[in-house]
């Protein structure tokens, strides 16, 4: 009598959340410092003090700080985002094609609903392993999700598989760089290869194939890598961004969606985005945080905090003998499970108080994801447990 | 190639917004005080100073103020809402069946998606004149919208028409009290009549018919009327609420959804609500404002401000000779157009710098809506223009 698909989603909200709740329960049982919780991507670097100071002065000084804004966001915010992105990535944008959203998830959901035609056999391509919400948003919009396998060595896309999976029904492709759950970053050569395939296929099928770049971790790159901003490489592109990770305010829900002005009929696409936002119930992004954006663009939390964690965790896991993908960015590390079934491996790890997310959640088997946005002390204390877990399997 | 239905929605975002933008343009041309803008329901009573002080101390003192919360909201917030509603309306609720939302619009959109089964001929009933978003949210979820006509004298529902419109496909009914656009409040006798019809029809069709109460204006009732809280009258009920109007912070997007614990299989319904929220892209309501709720429940902006406006506007319009529905609540007044075509009447009113919303937007012809959440001085200065508009039609 009610929507059973949504009921099923609500019952199994996410394996990650369940592990996080298990970790909290376990901490209460045996002590906070005895449980090594690598489950949740909740930024642990502090929100910059400047950001909090700006929020306070906005509340004190701006008479209309809490008022409605237009659904696509305050004009000064959209202009500030445009100018910041143009300067940082040497690209050309249009403030009228920027939509301020309540984070990256709504931006993705809105984009999927703007592009997908229901009952039209539309397909959306994603690259495994991938963020679980992609499936939820695409299927809710009426698109089928098609998964491209990774190159098992680099965890970059298997481009032969990608090319095979594109067909006349392919409406859009989502990629995520830096990538949750592997921390892999798509460097320029990867973006060039990906977009050259798409351009060829657009000609072959004679219609746009939209490319959505989901980039909430854009600033979280630790080595000397130039971030290839997608509007410089591919016309039919959309950027989904969130301030959650770079400013450590994931609960406040603030981000944006950028339509490349070079998109085929960008004006129509932007109307569809406005309409999709309305139809899903989005009135406007939180107005206080919209007003914060022009005053904080370019500012980040202490990201060196995560780099130190990455190096510490990566080096120790390698030393113990784990098979680990080297992460260039984000705050995740992808580790090969010590048995084929990652869910069983995650269960076994719990015996050593290690809370690891099985990669099955990311449409890919045999690995676990560790979110290392934790205090350094947690990583230091957990090394012994990782060693014990490794030895447990060796002795088996 | 893109979603044309969403594109059409995005092109005509709303007649109200267009009038509001026209008013702003016109103010720039002839002066702020020469244009009488009754278009938008943007609260003009100030946000209480206590609320801003609380927001500032939360930012200063709470270490995790910007962190993710669970999707249904912080436990302390849900418990506080439960206790406040129980005490205020002498009802019994369950904090596990309360979902903190980004305002009333997402609550409605989430409820529609939780209840509706796509391609199942589900129908949703609303009472004309009604808030335009009901159609958008219900149709997006896959339900057909069925409109019940009002009693033309009282603008309460025509209950004969209501009874006729309920059938085996009726999945849910939305009502709104105080009502946008008429300001009418459903007193206890109306709620008793409405629910007794629904109870009879539930038995007749042998399945629940859910009743959704959309109540963002609940505190904006100016005369001595007891608000009949729906969980006390009908088991299969859902409450959608927003703090936008009572605390004058509509841009911040904070509200809640309450599932009556007496609902048929309330646990399953709540799972469907969690799943629907996820599938639409809602991660959590803004965390700063979630934390505000327990500290501000019961607090309101100066609502007497609107009562003074109502009395001033109502009495003057009646005196001039307009046919006006007496508004018990909200900050809207519904006035009969002086010609059958309300859109043409709204155009004519522009000549006198009066910005009035034609009732066609609310699925009802022949009236205009005036949002009197404006400064008192605007109302005072506009009376002359209303007289001129009236005389213009008299002399025609």
Image: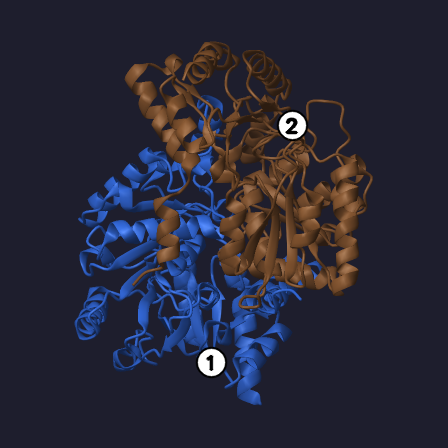
Chain colours: A blue, B brown
Q: Quadrant of the C terminus of chain A?
A: bottom right
Residue for badge 2: B329
For marks 2 and 1, give the one nearer the viewer: 2
Q: Residue furthest front?
A: B396
At a point 52% along the width and 23% down the height, the residue shown is B44
Using the rendered image of the protein, determine whether residue A252 is visible from the camera's viewpoint: yes
- Residue A331 location (% of width, % of height): 42, 60
Please state the horizontal and vertical placement of residue B393, each as a whole percent of the image: 44, 18
For residue A365, the mark is: 1
Labels 2, 1: one chain: no
Mark 2: which secondary structure? loop
Instruction: Say left or right for A300 vs B222.
Output: left
- Above or below residue B314? Residue B88 is below
- The residue located at (47%, 81%) in the rendering is A366
Q: For the N terminus of chain A, which image quadrant?
A: bottom right
Q: Residues within 10 Å of mark 1 (few under 14, many from 20)?
A: some
The image position of residue B138, as x and y in percent, is 54, 54
Rendering coords of residue A300 (x, y %): 37, 44
In this view, B159 is above or below B346: below
Label 2 chain ID = B
Answer left or right for B306 relative to B265.
left
> What whole-number distance in Å separates the C-alpha atoms at marks 2 and 1?
57 Å
For disc 2, the neighbor class at 10 Å (few under 14, some 14 to 19, many from 20) is many
Q: Is the residue A357 above or below the residue A299 in the image?
A: below
Outermost residue toward the bottom in this view: A396
Identify the residue shown where x is 43% and y is 58%: A109
Q: Kindly identify which chain the residue marked by label 1 belongs to.
A: A
């Amino acid at each position: 009598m009610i929507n059973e698909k949504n009921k099923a989603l609500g019952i199994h909200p996410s394996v990650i959340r369940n592990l996080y709740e298990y970790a909290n329960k376990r901490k209460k049982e045996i002590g906070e410092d005895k449980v090594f919780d690598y489950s949740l991507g909740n930024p642990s670097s502090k929100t910059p003090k400047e950001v909090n100071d700006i929020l306070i002065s906005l509340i004190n000084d701006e008479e209309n700080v809490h008022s409605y804004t237009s659904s696509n966001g305050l004009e000064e915010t959209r202009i500030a985002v445009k100018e910041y992105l143009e300067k940082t990535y040497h690209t050309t944008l249009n403030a009228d094609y920027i939509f301020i959203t309540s984070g990256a998830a709504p931006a993705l959901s809105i984009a999927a609903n703007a592009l997908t035609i229901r009952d039209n056999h539309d397909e959306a391509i994603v690259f495994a392993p991938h963020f679980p919400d992609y499936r939820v948003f695409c299927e809710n919009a009426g698109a089928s999700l098609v998964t491209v396998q990774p190159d098992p060595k680099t965890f970059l896309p298997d481009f032969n598989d990608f090319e095979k999976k594109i067909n006349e029904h392919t409406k859009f492709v989502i990629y995520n760089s830096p990538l949750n759950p592997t921390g892999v970053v798509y460097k320029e050569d990867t973006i060039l290869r990906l977009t050259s395939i798409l351009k060829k296929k657009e000609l072959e099928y004679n219609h746009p194939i939209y490319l959505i770049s989901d980039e909430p971790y854009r600033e979280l790159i630790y080595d000397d890598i130039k971030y290839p901003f997608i509007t410089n490489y591919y016309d039919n592109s959309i950027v989904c961004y969130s301030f959650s990770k770079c400013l450590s305010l994931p609960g406040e829900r603030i981000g944006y969606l950028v339509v490349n002005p070079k998109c085929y009929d960008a004006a129509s696409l932007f109307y569809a985005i406005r309409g999709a936002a309305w139809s899903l119930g989005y009135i406007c992004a939180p107005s206080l945080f919209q007003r914060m954006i022009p005053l904080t663009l370019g500012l980040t939390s202490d990201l060196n905090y995560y780099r130190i964690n990455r190096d510490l965790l990566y080096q120790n896991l390698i030393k113990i003998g784990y098979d680990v993908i080297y992460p260039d960015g984000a705050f995740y590390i992808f580790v090969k499970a010590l048995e084929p079934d990652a869910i069983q491996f995650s269960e076994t790890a719990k015996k050593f108080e290690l809370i690891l997310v099985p990669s099955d959640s990311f449409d890919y088997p045999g690995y676990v994801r560790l979110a290392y946005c934790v205090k350094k002390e947690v990583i230091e204390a957990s090394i012994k447990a990782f060693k014990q877990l490794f030895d447990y399997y060796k002795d088996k």
